[in-house]
Amino acid sequence: MASASEFAWSKDFAIGLIGMGDMGKMYARRLSQAGWRVMACDREEKYEELVQEFSDHTNIQILKNGHLVSRASSYIIYSVEAAAIGRVVAQYGPSTRLGAIVGGQTSCKDPEIKAFEEYLPSDVDIVSCHSLHGPNVDTRGQPLVLIKHRASDESFNKVEAVLSCLESKHVYLTAKEHDRITADTQAVTHAAFLSMGKAWHANQQFPWEISRYVGGIENVKINLMLRIYAQKWHVYAGLAILNPEAHKQINQFAKSTTELFYLMLEGKRDELRERVYAAKDKVFGAEGSPKWAEKPLLRDGVLDRFSLGKKPDASAPPLPNNHLSLLAMVDCWSKLGIVPYDHMICSTPLFRLWLGVTEHLFRTPGLLDECLRVGIEDNTFRRDDLQFTIAACGWAECVALRQFETWRERFAVTQKFFEPRFKGAVEVGQAMIKAVLESSKD
């Protein structure tokens, strides 16, 4: 792990953090542990609380506002909500220290870069970043996107040196490339889990208490749904609504979900099979192709032990499911020409896990055919599928209309429904992600 003392220019180099949410705090702690001087702030009403929280961190100085941070810092990172970035940069950007480096940690770079270009002084270099994981995930080996938007080589090298203490895997992109890839790897994935939560909530179900939702793939659905609803609503709203690249993905996911559900309802077995298999060949390659022969992302059985519930009969196989969410995901990728493997270097742990179970469904002999059979013949999951389809269309409409307040309200009511189980789910989800990442290295 690189430390500040290794760099001759680090003596008077201070790092400013504007925004001390979960990611801002994680960055502050990791940077200070590496010996960097950190100046940080959040809203002024949080000043005393933050002073107390970081009183034992000698390298972290809490200031009252972003003006003071901007004047005192050599490299400033805005770690605020994507929806608020324009307002916050407009407020504090003009106070930026002469010749400083400025970047942002938002998940959507389009509004961030526009704000920097409009409100920062012309003598300021712009180098943005984005850690492609949540604040509670080990940063080591995770993707860290670096965007050299308007900067000298010297400034960019300094940012790399500072952030090397995270021990992440650096990925170099433009702002537009970043937004396209995060839309491909995160927006639809989040929409799927958000829709699952809304569906179970609509049917007043805690799925881990129901025997039909116990098993490897079901474990992923339940744990990651709870993991998303345990986070802050604006993380997902900003990525979906403010990222222009995400709109078409979320709209297509809703369309794919609806059309596949209609085929199941209408009993159109041949048409459903033809469509799903065409998507399978496009995304995963035909059986026997070089692409098909590649090692799967998940080992058999690695997910079975991560359950919040228990099977009535531990020896019984999981109840067959049509897995509409997974079928719709692959259909969506197929319709948009997205090859998810192309973005693995920028993938989040959640995306790798979701792609792994999707791959498992489509590549395990007999499993996909059983899935299609259930979709046509079995009504066990029909109520849940109906609510899932309604939810997917609801999130897509929120995005199309850019309705932040509606998004927040939709998210909050379901978050409250599942809140009692967040603590255990987050712990199980962490263990699941760790096991999957370790198995993928074997």
Image (tube, helix red, strand yellow):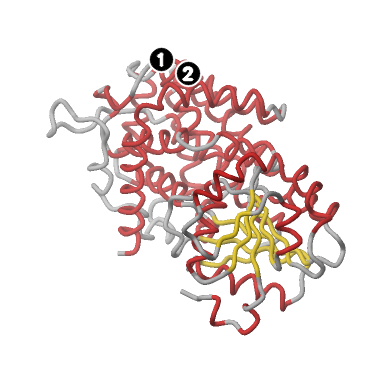
Rendering coords of residue 60 (x, y %): 56, 61
Rendering coords of residue 5 (x, y %): 54, 80
Mark 2 sits on what residue?
Answer: 387
Determine whether, in the image, residue 64 is placed left or right of residue 414: right
Q: CA distance from mark 2 to mark 1?
A: 8 Å
Query: Could you say whether the residue bearing mark 2 is in a helix, strand or loop?
Result: helix
Q: Are marks 2 and 1 in contact (CB under 8 Å)?
A: yes
Query: Could you say whether the residue bearing mark 1 is in a helix, strand or loop?
Result: loop
Amino acid at the residue labelled 1: Asn
Mark 1 sits on what residue?
Answer: 203
Report if residue 274 is visible in the image.
Answer: no
Above or below for 434 versus 407: below
Determine whether, in the image, residue 374 is placed left or right of residue 258: left
Amino acid at the residue labelled 2: Gln
* Depth order, front residue of 247/93: 93
Query: Which mark's residue is nearer the viewer, 2 or 1?
Result: 1
* Depth order, front residue of 334/49: 49
Q: Residue at x 49, y 33 (%)?
A: 192
Q: Nearer the N terminus, badge 2 or badge 1?
A: 1
The image quadrant that residue 369 belongs to is top left
Callout 1 crowding tier (Cα within 10 Å): few <14, some 14–19, many ≥20: few
Rendering coords of residue 281 (x, y %): 47, 46
